[in-house]
Image (cartoon, rainbow, N blue to C red):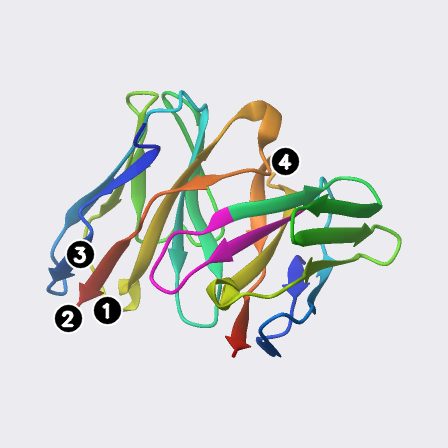
């Protein structure tokens, strides 16, 4: 089957660094993505890893290890506005096609002053 | 540039009623998707389309139908609403070359009484 696991909640203080982990089990693998969703809002794309290693986009970085079926999202210099849910998603072969994303259940990040 | 627009934003239905959710995108994307989001369950794919006139089932298609008569529009229908279909529905779109990046609408909050 297909499954993604990530922690349900993470709490950190403003200015700190936080890491949100994601492990996946899928029949195929075509990349790991991360999305951010503020309460009541639409998910928005943050980053994508197709190959092993670290991708950096400003304060956010994402890492992938395909051999370990594992990735993480790293948020640095946390700000209050980073309080949101973060979803990892795998582009997988499902029903013979590779056009779909399988989402994890999300990690709720609470940034405290 | 509106991106992905969903109509309506809120709706309350009685069990057995029918309704159609409309999704429109102005980015000329080939791929469109309908998800539902329930507390603690992340985003689950209902149906998707890889082009005008084509649709396919996702992870949780039962009780829903879709149509893609025009490239820019993707309709989600509930023929006979059930309380289990109370959820937040998101539409998304993407391009063939960047399938890991999906653009989401603001969502439709549906309650079935």
Co-location on one chain, circles 1 and 4: no
Depth check: A35 or A83 in front? A83
Co-location on one chain, circles 4 and 2: no
The mark closer to the camera, 3 or 2, is 3
Tag of residue A96: 4
Co-location on one chain, circles 3 and 4: no
Q: Chain of mark 4?
A: A
Depth check: B9 or B87 in front? B9
Taking the spot 29% from the left edge, 68% from the top edge, the residue there is B84
Residue B16 is one of the magenta-drawn residues: no
The mark closer to the camera, 3 or 4, is 3
Co-location on one chain, circles 3 and 2: yes
Taking the spot 52% from the left edge, 26% from the top edge, the residue there is B95
Give, as a single range, the part of the protein colored magenta: A32-44
Tag 2 secondary structure: loop
Tag of residue B113: 2
Tag 1 secondary structure: helix
The mark closer to the camera, 4 or 2, is 2
Could you say which quadrant of the image residue A14 lies in?
bottom right
Co-location on one chain, circles 2 and 1: yes
Taking the spot 36% from the left edge, 56% from the top edge, the residue there is A41
Question: Is the N terminus of chain A in the top left, top right, bottom left or bottom right quadrant?
Answer: bottom right
Q: Is residue A43 above or below residue B20?
A: below
Distance from Cα at disc 1 to Cα at disc 3? 15 Å
Depth check: B82 or B23 in front? B23
Q: Is residue B18 above or below residue B100?
A: below
Tag of residue B10: 3
Crowdedness near tag 2: few (<14), some (14–19) or many (≥20) residues, C-alpha within 10 Å: some
N-term-proximal mark, 1 vs 3 = 3
Q: Which residue is mark 1?
A: B83
- Image spot of residue A10 (x, y percent): 60, 77
Distance from Cα at disc 1 to Cα at disc 4? 32 Å
């Amino acid at each position: 089957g297909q499954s993604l696991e990530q922690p349900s909640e993470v709490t950190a203080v403003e200015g700190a660094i936080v890491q949100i982990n994601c492990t996946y089990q899928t029949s195929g693998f075509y990349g790991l993505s991360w999305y951010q969703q503020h309460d009541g809002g639409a998910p928005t794309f943050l980053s994508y890893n197709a190959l092993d290693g670290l991708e950096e986009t400003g304060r956010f970085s994402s890492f992938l290890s395909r051999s370990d079926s594992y990735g993480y999202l790293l948020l640095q210099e946390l700000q209050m506005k980073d309080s949101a849910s973060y979803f990892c998603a795998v582009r997988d072969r499902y029903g013979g096609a590779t056009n779909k994303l399988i989402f994890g259940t999300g990690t709720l990040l609470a940034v405290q002053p | 540039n509106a991106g992905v627009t969903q109509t309506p934003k809120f709706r309350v239905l009685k069990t057995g009623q029918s309704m159609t959710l409309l999704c429109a995108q102005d980015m000329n994307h080939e791929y469109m998707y309908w998800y539902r989001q329930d507390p603690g369950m992340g985003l689950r794919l209902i149906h998707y389309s890889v082009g005008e006139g084509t649709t396919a089932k996702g992870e949780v298609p039962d009780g829903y139908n879709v149509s893609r008569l025009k490239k820019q529009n993707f309709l989600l229908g509930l023929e006979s609403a059930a309380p289990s279909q109370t959820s937040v529905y998101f539409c998304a779109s993407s391009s063939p070359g960047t399938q890991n990046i999906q653009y989401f609408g603001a969502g439709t909050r549906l309650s079935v009484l």
